[in-house]
Image (spheres, rainbow, N blue to C red):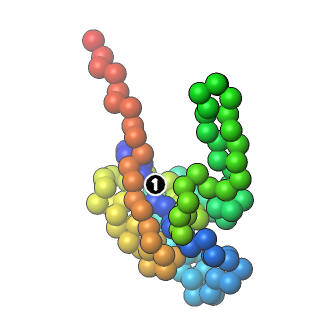
Amino acid sequence: MPQYLVAIHLPDSYDPSKESEATVRDITALNEEMIAARVRTYVGGLESAGKAKSLRAQPDGQVLVTDGPYIESKEHVGGFWILETANLDEALAWGRKAAKACRAPVEVRAIFQKPAAASN
């Protein structure tokens, strides 16, 4: 069954301690619904982008490590679900629910599946 990333985008200034009770309640209910539907395979929240480390391979073979996110942006992925659904339409339906529950933009993306080798 295909898997999809459902990523929540949050502003750099996001402070989880200031999340409303209604939002927490709605996200909890969504998680419970995903579990009951057996579509949620993983869920995770991320620390702020300011705490990220970015690594870049250099021409000399070394790897440069810098503080902060790889891409400068006003929003970053703040959390995500990995869902296993029948198809993209079902993943988008869960994404709509996530956008409402989180009160934030959501990105839904298929997780690349290597095609099965043909059997001879």
Relative vertical location of residue 79 with respect to residue 42 in this rendering, above or below = below
Quarter the N terminus occupies: top left
Residue 104 lies left or right of residue 20; in this view the side is left
Relative vertical location of residue 22 with respect to residue 58 in this rendering, above or below = below
Along the line of sight, the residue nearer the viewer: 25 or 74:
74
Quarter the C terminus occupies: top left
Q: Which residue lies under the disc numbered 1?
A: 5
Look at 63% across and 87% down and name the residue there.
Answer: 21
Relative vertical location of residue 119 with respect to residue 29 in this rendering, above or below = above
Q: Amino acid at mark 1?
A: Leu
Look at 34% across and 30% down and name the residue there.
Answer: 115
> Would you identify the image quadrant in which residue 65 lies?
top right
> Would you identify the image quadrant in which residue 32 lies?
bottom right
Look at 38% across and 72% down and name the residue there.
Answer: 96
List x then y, in percent, for residue 39: 45, 57
Residue at the farthest front position: 60
Along the line of sight, the residue nearer the viewer: 95 or 105:
105
Relative vertical location of residue 101 with respect to residue 54 in this rendering, above or below = below
